[in-house]
Amino acid sequence: MSPPRRPRAAPGGAKLGCARASLTIRGGRRAEAAGLAVCLLAMVAAGCEGVLPEPDFERMLHQRGYRPFERSVQFEDGRVMRPPPLGTIARGEVLGQPALTRGVEPSGAYTAQIPVPVTRAVLERGRDRFDIYCSACHGVRGDGDSMVASNMTLRRPPSLIDEPVLSFPPGRVFQVASVGYGLMPAYDIHLSVSDRWAVVAYLGALQRSQRVRLTDLPPAQRARALAALGGGAR
Ligand code: HEC
């Protein structure tokens, strides 16, 4: 059941609420009559003045207003949308070296080396974030094999462990993760700068792990790998 509609306050703010309130006073007709009389008297005497009118929000809806990107004669540059004062920074914007925060060197080239120390903890963190934020589309191995990818008909998420992404400089992968690319959304609101670099570092590990040669492995790992492969050397 929908709640009863409240009557809108009449212009001038006449308040009918007090009459209703007094009618609900318990304790017989006398109290009720007295309440009503007092209320009526107060209304007549005060002419309902002193009761503040409700602010007229309707007026703000109906008055003439600018639309975004409209021309304005009010301002010298003719733009109704005012540029923020010089030096304003967006809330949450990370300040610092662009090589670290945007993956781009001052020269405009992509950052060629991961600008944070790549430790085991960083790689673990990268794996954690990659599995949460990237693997849904690019697959846990980064090879582009995922349920989402198989259902994306318009443009499939590419493999991140094969060309051309394989030879992307780290800064480019960082940039894609930060601002998105084509159909891929940006992840800067979900991943901090250090988390994005951790993902880039982990992606490096994924790329390496998928194409490692048996001869590159230390003897113990090599023996284990050979055993797992059924003894067949590659
Ligand atoms: C919602 C699915 C989705 C998720 C999640 C996703 N991607 Fe993508 N990614 C795509 C698609 C689709 C493309 C291809 C976009 C295009 O070509 O329009 C792509 C492209 C890329 C590329 C190649 C860009 C280029 O320059 O060619 C990289 C690198 C990449 N993604 C990295 C990541 C990383 C790192 C993450 C996790 C932070 C991630 N992606 C999460 C869908 C996704």
Image: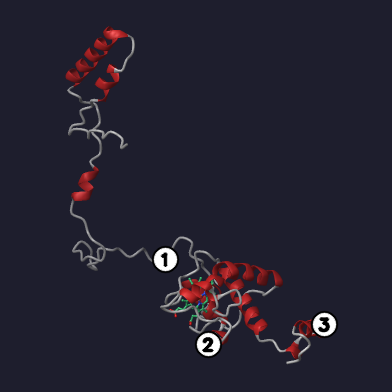
Helix, strand or loop status at disc 3: helix
Residue type at numbered disc 2: Pro
Q: CA distance from mark 1 to mark 3?
A: 57 Å
Q: Position of residue 45 (x, y in %)?
A: 18, 18
> Foreground: 80 or 47?
47
> Foreground: 105 or 11?
11
The quarter of the displayed image where residue 196 is located: bottom right
Lateral position of residue 128 relative to residue 18, left or right:
right
Q: CA distance from mark 2 to mark 1?
A: 38 Å
Residue type at numbered disc 1: Gly
Mark 3, residue position: 220
The quarter of the displayed image where residue 111 is located: bottom right
Numbered circle sitting on residue 164: 2
Helix, strand or loop status at disc 2: loop
Q: Position of residue 77 (x, y in %)?
A: 24, 68
Mark 1, residue position: 87
Q: Nearer the viewer, mark 2 or mark 1?
A: 2
Q: Residue at x 25, y 10 (%)?
A: 34
Q: Earlier in the sequence, mark 1 or mark 3?
A: 1
